[in-house]
Amino acid sequence: MPAARLPCSPCQGASGKFGKLLLLFSFFYDLNNVLMSNPCGAVQQAAAPHYFAINRNGTGGFRLNETMPTGYELAHQQAETIFRHVFPRQGMTVREGQIQLCHTMLDALFGREVALCDAGVGLGKTYAYLVAAILWMRQRALPLRQPLVISTASVALQDAILKEYIPFLSSILIQFGYVEEPIQTVLRKGKGRYVCDLRLLKRQRELVRRGEEFARRLRVLRGANSCLDLDQIQGLSGYDRRHICVPERCERDCLARQRCRYQRYLHQAAHGGLQIQICNHNYLLADAIHRQNGWNPLLRDYGALIIDEAHKLPEVNQQMQTQSLSVADLYSLSDRLARENLIHDAQLLRRTTKELVAVFDDLRHGQEREIPYVPQQEQLMQLNRLEQQLREYIQQNCGKLSRPLQRALHQTAELAQRFLRPDDHSIRYVEFITKSGEGEKMASLNAVPKDLPECLYNALWSRGKTAILTSGTLAAGDRFSNTKRQLGLECGVPIRTLRVSSPFHYQQNCLLVFPGGYNAKARGETNNVQGARLVKQLVEAANGHALVLFTSYEQMGVMYETLKQDLKFAVLQARRGSQTAVEQFKQMPNGVLLAGGPCWEGMDFPGDMVSLLVIVSLPFPVPDPVREARRAQYADLHTYIQAEIVPEMQQKLRQGFGRAIRSETDSCAVAILDPRAEPGGRYHQAVLDALPPDIPVTTKIEDIEPFLRAHKSPDYFLPDHD
């Protein structure tokens, strides 16, 4: 007998006095959940789900075998039905881990907790949290309903949620009676990503006056007449983008304010009937900082928060909390002074900036890109000169400067003052970059709070909001302790954790290879020759179809020059920030891609595209002043490495390993060249703990070909794949 369709709210299917009583009961149930919190911040554990039988009565409504389920119980029942009966009718596979994930998320939402959910590759965590969020919102009493926020780290995932997941889910839930109308969403991004209509009109008129030479750019700009989102406009130059985006501050007396598309978008986001707001981690933390400072919030107030790709949140938190006195910003201030006809002041500021760079270059010794900030008298004098100069500009030109430039000068002077006085609460360092033809030059002075987890706690968790944090790499081994520490969740926040393994059969479809013969401690040519030789043997055994991941772009470039001559397969390298090579590789039958950085995570290589994954070195984090300062908190180096460095390596390794198998039918050999990962090596067990259990292990490269022949189609090794 097919399962009965369940109502999408406690009072749907009921009417009259009974329906009103039921709605009142639901209201007090949710109100009770709100009041469950005690003064210490802990909440009572949500009760384990109890499922009640519901049968159709003769009138098409529902009657209860024993008692009417609460909203909490009904949401769990509906989740069961959606994943076990509704989704399979659309061709989707029933995954027990996905259902378990959804139930845990529902428990956290109803229990006002923070849930850390480590979900393996291919589990379907996006549908798990979307279903949980929608059912939770629908079971809340109307007076308690608020929008929900979903925060991601990548634009690709945002687009997928907006254009694929939500439309599909909305259609299915309407069809089966769980919601009455489409799920409403809005994408929230920084104002620099949207078109300012007034600035667009001015820029278009400038290009018209310049004639045919700028006709192509003018055609691109005309696309902005019908598209508010700059990210959706193809071919837009960086210069034009900066000159037509919404400025840092919209003036209230703007002539176009009443008909401005950006202002209409803001009004809709603040007052519409939307249910889900989607943003990135930077925007989420910017909103939190606004609320901390008493400024206007960027996001509409929300009832719960879902953070996907949550392993990226600590990194974004450090970026957002870092204050930088940047050389590039100082030159930009000089250009802005010149545009406001303060030519002499602009020239003085450029000269002072160059002198500042010169005195800080004297502090640098060795090859480190970042050194601790320990200024001598000469550097302090130059900083003081810069600060005084900026304040003089503000005082002498008070009536001439635009308000945005006044604010920028004031903020920069405050930053300079910060680096003039002692600071026991920050980690301060000087960052250098390579400038063409000039070698290493100072890029910025940076100050990072010593207690970044506390900053994150104050920004997000101290408000007591329900939150679900999910990713494929939140746990190191089976432990969440490192993630809790990094996220500031060790301060009495009520937490539940769940790790659900990938549904893929790694034990049958994956082979883990530790080939040996590579000396990671060797320097220069010896190191690269050994590595290139091993990679060549591995690629030939797998007949191409290889992704080789590096932790050093320099090493990748050297090996590329060797491999492109020695291999019969096409060899590509994905340089920093370039996606062209990745797209070319996806079109090749059996090419070889050397990559680093972004290709460790987020890239999808399904099917036979990647049948050999080579990890050249274990992805240990690069030492920097922030990590060195944290090291001082531990009794010895070994304790620090085990507590912080190894868990970070394991998380990054899991991300890289996730490129190997992307579906149930994929098969792949994974080779790790780093000798520290070999059997008997210092980190062999840490590597095994990071990867799915019981994967077959070998030290012989010749085992790769028979493994792949057993899993691939007969034509995989044919010569015409070259």
Image (spheres, rainbow, N blue to C red):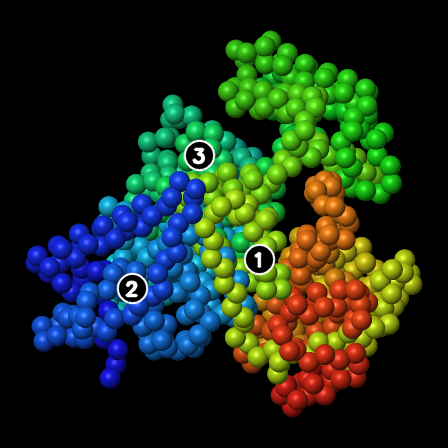
Answer yes or no: is residue 349 visible: no
On-image quarter of the N terminus = bottom left
The answer to whether the residue labelled 3 contacts the one labelled 1, judged by CB atoms less than 8 Å apart, is no
Residue 263, image quadrant: top left
Q: Determine crowd level at label 1: few under 14, some 14-19, many 20+ residues with C-alpha closer than 10 A.
A: some
Identify whether 230 is placed above or below 498.
Answer: above
Which sits in the foreground, 633 or 62? Answer: 633
Q: Which mark sits nearer the N-terminus, 3 or 2?
A: 2
Residues at marks 2 and 1, CA–CA distance in whole angstroms: 28 Å
Mark 3 falls on what kind of element?
helix
Amino acid type, mark 3: Arg
Left or right relative to 309: residue 654: right
Identify the residue position indicated by label 2 in the image: 73
* Side (left or right) of 21 relative to 376: left
Q: Position of residue 49 (x, y in %)?
A: 34, 66
The reply, left or right, for residue 326 in relation to residue 462 is: right
Q: Quadrant of the C terminus?
A: bottom right
Q: Could you say which quadrant of the image residue 530 lies in?
A: bottom right
Q: Which residue is mark 1?
A: 480
Q: Residue at x 9, y 72 (%)?
A: 59
What is the spatial separation of the Cα atoms under label 3 and label 2, in whole angstroms?
34 Å
Is residue 25 placed above or below 176 in the rendered structure?
above
